[in-house]
Image (cartoon, rainbow, N blue to C red):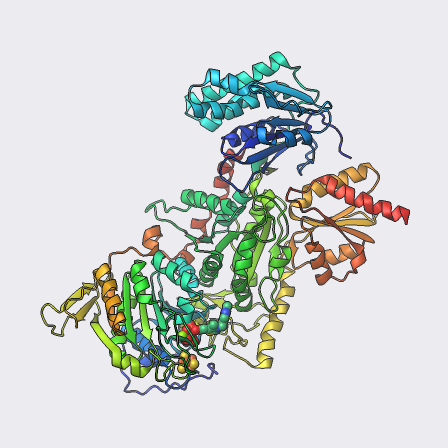
Amino acid sequence: MSYIAKPKVTHPGLPRNELGLTVRDYEGGMSTLCAGCGHDSVTSAIVQAAFELNLPPHKMAKLSGIGCSSKTPAYFLSQSHGFNSVHGRMPSVATGANAANRGLVYVGVSGDGDSLSIGLGQFAHAIRRNVNMLYIIENNGVYGLTKGQFSASADVGSKAKKGEENLQPPIDPCQMAIALGCGFVARSFSGDKQQLVPLLEAGIRHNGFALIDVISPCVTFNDHEGSTKSYHFTREHYHPAIHADYIPPAAEIRAKYDEGCAMPVTLHDGSQIVLRKVDPDYDPTDRAAAIAHLEQLSAAREIVTGLLYIDESKPEMHELNKTTETALNKLPFERLCPGRDALRSLQQRFR
Amino acid sequence: MSTGPKDNDFTIKIANVNGTGSASANALLMKVFFRMGIPVVGKNYFPSNIQGLPTWYEIRVSGDGHLGRSGRVDLMIAMNAETYQKDLHELAPGGYLIYDSTWPRHRQLKRDDVHILGIPLARMCNEHFDTARARVLMKNVAYVGAVAALLDLDMEVIREALQRTFASKQHLIDANLTAIDLGYNYAREHFQCPLPFRARPMDATAGHIMIDGNTATALGCLYAGATVGAWYPITPSTSVMDAFKSFAEKYRRDPDSDERNFVILQAEDELAAIGMVLGANWNGARAFTPTSGPGISLMSEFLGYGYFTEIPAVVIDVQRCGPSTGMPTRTQQADIMACAYASHGDTRHILLFPANPEECFYMAVQAFDLAERMQTPVIMLTDLDIGMNDWMCRELDWDDAYQPDRGKVLDAAALEKMASFHRYLDVDADAIPYRTFPGEHPRGAYFTRGSGHNMYGAYTEDAREYQEVVDRLRRKWETAKRYVPEPIVEYSEKYRSGIISLGSCNDAVQEARARLRDAGVGTNYLRVRAFPFTDEVQQFIDAHERIYVVEQNRDAQLRSLLLLETRCDQDRLIPVLHYNGLPIDAAAVTDAINEDLQKGVAA
Ligand SMILES: Cc1ncc(C[n+]2csc(CCOP(=O)(O)OP(=O)(O)O)c2C)c(N)n1
Ligand code: SF4
Ligand SMILES: [Mg+2]
C-alpha cells in the first residue's frame, strides 16, 4: 500500500538544485501501480521537472480525480499538499484552490476516463476560465482502475483485450482544448521523457491553463496487439511535430538551432521555450492551422506530439477578475469585514 | 378563528401581471406602513416565468406584530383580468375589492357579500401620461394613491418615500405624485374614506429594517470574511449571490488599486460549485455556495467527500417546493432529510435553521465559524419565504471585536516547532484534528483523499484503521453539539403540550400559540435552530405528553429526524404539516391542534 514509505537513501553524490534539494526531495510514496504502467513514467517526469525548475515543494499543490492515473499524486512531491478528489471533478477543486491562493503552482493529474467522460464538463470549463495550472491527462484509452473498459479516447477500430472493437469516434483532448481557447496544448508519450520533461516545465511556467495529453499505456488492459494505445503502436506511429526546449529566465540559449526551424517563445516570467519544428510548415501559434494539422495526421493514424499550440497573451482567471495580488487566504480579516459603522449606514436603504 | 379586519390589522393583496412594473409600486405601499411605524410584512407570489403570467403581492399589516401569512384577504386590488374570478373568490366576506373600471366587468362574476370599488385607472392614466410605458407603470402607482385614501395613509410619508426612491430624478417624482393624486382624489370623491379598517400611526418599527433573507445572508457572508463564492443560478437562491456581488463590489475593492479582494465563480453546475468551495476552503479561504434543492441533490457526492476528508464548506439551501423541479417559486421545508444525511455512506451534516432574515445574517457568520471549527460542511437551510420576501426585523448589529473562529489551523511557525504533523490525529481528545494550508511549510503537507485513510492521513484498507477514523468522526459529531446554536425554548410547567418547529414556521406558530392561549389552550414551544440536536431538545421531548411538530413538508421530515436522533416514541410526536407551496399560516397550526384536542376529548 502507498503509505509504505519509500526508503530515502540520499547518495552524497546526488546533484542538488538551486534550493539545495536533490531529486529525492521531490519524490513521493511508493507506487502501487502495475509494473510497467505508463503512469509511473509520468510521475518520474514530474519529479524531474519540479527538481529542475527549483520549485520549493511546499509551494506546489497536486490535485487529481479518480483512476489509476489519479492515484499518482501520492507518488510524487511528498512535501506538497495533495488533493485526491472525486471522479471527474478535480478541475473545480483546482479552480477553487487557485481562487483562494494564486501564489502556488498547481499540478492536476487526471485520466482519459476522468477528464473525457465523467469530467468532460469540468475539464472544458476550467479551460474556459483559464485557471492557471498544469493539467496532465494520462491517456491510456481505457478505464484502468475499473479493469479495462473503453474510454472516450479509444480510437475507432482499437481492440479490447478480449477482442471487442471500439466503434465510437474518440474525443481528442488536444483538439478540444485548442477549440476551447486553451493557451498551451501539448501531447507527449510516457515513454519519451526527453520530450515530456521540458513540456512539463514549460506547462508549469505557462500563465494560464496548460494541457499536456500524455499517451501512457496501460500494460494490464490495453497493451496488446490491436490496441492503438499500446507501447508498440505508439512508438510506431509517433510523430514528433515540435520539440520544446525549456530555458529558465537566467540561462542563455546555448543550443544551436537551424534557422527557420527554431522558434523562441517568451513566457510570462521571462523564461523561454525554444520550439524546434520537425515539420517546417507547422505553426503552433496558428489555432486553425493547429487543429487542421491534428485532424490530418490523426486521420492518417499518426500521433502528433510536442507543443501543439501556444498563446502566451491570454489573461488567466485572476487577471480577468482583477483579483488583488495578495493571496485571498492571506488577507487580514480587517480588510474583509466592513465593520459596524458600514453596517449601520448601509441599512438606511432597508428602512 | 381569525377575526375580521381592524385598524392596523388587515391584509392587502394585489393581483398583477408579471413584467408590468408593479413591484416598485407594491414595495412603496408596504414601506409606507413601515414608515408610519406599523409592523408589516410583504410576500410575493410569483410565477417561474419572466413576463406575462399572474403574480400577487400580499401585504399584511399587524399592529400586534404577527408577521406570518394571515391566510385571509381584506382588501384585494385586482389588476389582472385573467385571475379576477379567483381573486374575487379569495376575498374575505365583508372585504373590499378594487378593480380597473376602464373596462366593464364580466357580469357573471359577482359576490354580494363584499364591496366592489371600480376605479378607471387605465383611463385616468391614459389621459395624464404620454408614453405607453408610463401609462402602464403609473396605473400601479395610481392604485397606491387610492389605497392611501381608503386606509388613510400619511401622504407626507408617501411623498418622502418617492423622494428617496427617485432621489434626483425630479420628473419621476412628479409623475409618481400625479399618479398618486389621481387615485387618491378619485377614491375620495367616489367612496367613503377611510374604510372601517385603516392605518393608524404607531411607533413599533423604530430600530427595525425591512429586508429579505437572501440579502441578509449575503451580508453575513460578507461580514464573515468570505472571499470565494461559487454558484450556479437557481431560484430562489440567486439573489444571495447577486447581493453578495453588489456588496463585495462596494466593500471589497482595494482602496488603492481598485483590485478585488474576492472571487465569484459562476460554476458550470452545482457539482462544480461545491468542488470550488471545497478547493477554496481546503486552501484556507472562507468560501460558500448558495443553492436550492436540485443543487443539493447534485452536490451530494462532494458533501460526503467534505465530511470524510474534513474540509469546511458553507452551503446555503434556500429551499423551494419539491420534488424534482417542483414549484420553483413556491416555498417548502422539504430538504431537511436530504441535507442531514446528504451523500452515500455514513454521512451526516451540521444544519442551521434560521427563522427570519435577522437570523440569516448572524447564522451565516456562525456557519463559517462552525464549518472551520468542526472542519466539515455546514448547510444553512432557509427557504423561499425567508429568502425572497420582505420581512421586518431588528436592525442588524455587528461587534467590531469579532474575530473569525478559524478552528485548529497550524501555521508555519507552529509547524516549524513540531517534529511531525499528522492530519487526522485526535490530539486534544475532542475528536477535532489539526489542519494545515498548502504553501505554509513543507512539514504541513498531507494528502487529502476520500478513500480509506488512517489517523495519520495515509491510505488504508485496514479494518481497524478505517474504523478508528469513522468512529472519531462520530465523536466529532458529539463535540459539534457544544458549538451549534441552541434551540429557543418557551416553557412553563403549567402546560402539558409542546410544539416543536423550525425556520420560517416561527411566526405562524407564535401567532397560533397566542390564539390558542386566548382560547384557554396553553402550549410550550421549542424552535430547533440546528442539527445535531442539543440536549435541550431531548429535555423538551421528555417534559411533554404530546408534542406537535410543525413543519412545511408532506413527509414530516423534522419529526422523522427527531425520531431518529432523540429518544422518543412515535405516538407522542404529532405531525402538523403544511406543504402546498404557500407560506404556512397560523390557522394551519391551530386547526391541527384543535382537531387533535377534540379527538382527545372524544376518546
Ligand atoms: C462517481 C463514480 N463513478 C464511477 C467510479 C468508478 N471508477 C473509478 S476509476 C474509473 C475510471 C478511471 O479511468 P481513467 O480516468 O482513464 O483512469 P485510469 O485508471 O485509466 O488511469 C471509474 C469509472 C467512481 N470512482 N466514481
Ligand atoms: S491497470 Fe493499467 S492503468 Fe492501472 S496501474 Fe495497471 S497498467 Fe496502470
Ligand atoms: Mg484511462
User: Is B476 on the left-hand or right-hand side of B548?
Assistant: left
Q: Position of residue A330 (x, y in %)?
A: 41, 58
Residue B209: image x %, image y %? 57, 36
For residue A157, above or below residue B299: below
In the image, A5 versus B8, the foreground residue is B8
**Residue drawn at (59%, 81%), measured in percent from left and top?**
B463
Give the quadrant of residue B214.
top right
Residue plotted at (55% across, 31% down):
B27
Question: Residue B304's image quarter?
Answer: bottom right
State left or right for residue B20 relative to residue B485: left
Residue projecting furthest to the left: A259
Rendered position, B28 above or below B589:
above
Q: Quadrant of residue B370?
A: bottom right
x%, y% of residue B570? 78, 59
**Residue most toward the top?**
B189
Q: Where residue A256 appears, x then y in whole percent?
A: 11, 74
Is residue B9 positioned above or below B582 on the image?
Answer: above
Position of B143 compared to B285: left or right? Answer: right
| Towards the viewer: B222 or B149 | B149
Q: Is residue B206 above or below residue B382?
A: above
Residue A325 is at least partly visible in this image: no
Choose between B571 and A112: the one closer to the eye. Answer: A112
